[in-house]
Image: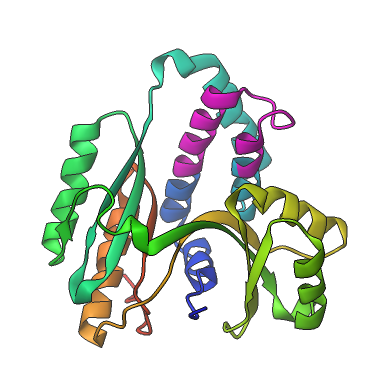
């Protein structure tokens, strides 16, 4: 599998400003609200909520914030009506882009997303125009310093839902799972003492494109601006990005 590691992107987000970190917490809080609405406030009986809580902890969201989000969602859900929306299209260099959002105003969100596609030389398309190029999978990152690849391969043989290992990143292994098995595989690894750096369900592209350096810089700016939108939860793409992001 091509060496598309989300780990550096995750690290980059964790190292950003307090304002950017607060934005991540706000997005996770919105995911908690939807999870509570769908399955209740008990993570023991609501696997979706358990997964979001694990994601919150991976992003260093304080426990007080997590509990406050759950209580708020439990008490005020009657007035919260977030809707899942997915937007698809192309960026420069033929890059396929998927934007997932949770919104209480579809027209506003669609307009904001379309504006950024247009601003950065892309084009927003119809539902399904690029999503067929991706597969929804669980992605678990583990530091290479913490485990040998041969040992990790043993888990691949033993654990149901453990599908593949990507070892091309210099710092981490990426374990790919069936999306429904992410939490169970993570728990089995952690129960055995394996330290998990992050775990999330992601859209993994089947193939990658390699834009020019100038196009890569444009794509990075576009992705950053999309992720800054309050309603946008995730942005996925199939570009191999080798250039560094400019510091603000």
Q: Which residues are magenta?
A: 26-51
- Left or right of 105? Residue 1 is right
* Total numbered circles: 0
Against 189, residue 99 (above or below) is above
| Main SS class of the magenta portion in the image | helix
Pinpoint residue 100: horizontal percent, then vertical percent.
Answer: 36, 47
Pinpoint residue 109: horizontal percent, then vertical percent.
Answer: 24, 40
Against 91, residue 202 (above or below) is above
Q: Is residue 31 magenta?
A: yes
User: Where on the picture, by quarter, is residue 170?
Assistant: bottom right
Using the rendered image of the protein, determine whether residue 61 is visible from the camera's viewpoint. no
Give the quarter of the figure containing the C terminus: bottom left
Pinpoint residue 25: horizontal percent, then vertical percent.
Answer: 50, 45
Residue at 51% over, 65% down: 10
Residue at 57% over, 19% down: 74
Residue at 37% over, 79% down: 240
Q: Is residue 143 magenta?
A: no
Using the rendered image of the protein, determine whether residue 232 is visible from the camera's viewpoint. yes
Pinpoint residue 197: horizontal percent, then vertical percent.
Answer: 67, 64
In front here: 62 or 108? Answer: 108
Residue at 35% over, 58% down: 132
């Amino acid at each position: 599998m091509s060496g598309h590691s989300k780990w550096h992107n995750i690290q980059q987000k964790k190292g950003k400003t307090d304002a950017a970190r607060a934005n991540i917490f706000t997005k996770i809080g919105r995911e908690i609200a939807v999870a509570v609405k769908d399955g209740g406030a008990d993570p023991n009986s609501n696997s979706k909520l358990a997964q979001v809580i694990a994601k919150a902890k991976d992003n260093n969201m304080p426990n007080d914030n997590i509990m406050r989000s759950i209580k708020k969602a439990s008490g005020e859900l009657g007035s919260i009506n977030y809707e899942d929306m997915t937007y698809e299209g192309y960026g420069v260099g033929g890059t396929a882009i998927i934007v997932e959002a949770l919104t209480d105003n579809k027209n506003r969100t669609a307009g904001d997303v379309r504006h950024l596609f247009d601003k950065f030389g892309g084009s927003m398309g119809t539902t399904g125009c690029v999503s067929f190029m991706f597969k929804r999978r669980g992605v678990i990152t583990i530091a290479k310093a913490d485990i040998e690849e041969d040992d990790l391969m043993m888990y691949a043989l033993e654990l149901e839902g453990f599908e593949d290992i990507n070892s091309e990143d210099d710092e981490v292994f990426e374990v790919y799972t069936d999306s429904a098995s992410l939490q169970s595989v993570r728990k089995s690894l952690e129960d055995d003492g394996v330290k998990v750096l992050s775990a999330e369900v992601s859209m993994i592209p089947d193939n990658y494109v390699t834009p020019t350096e100038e196009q890569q810089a444009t794509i990075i700016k576009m992705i950053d601006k999309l992720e800054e939108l309050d309603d946008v939860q995730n942005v996925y793409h199939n570009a191999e990005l080798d250039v560094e992001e400019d510091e603000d």
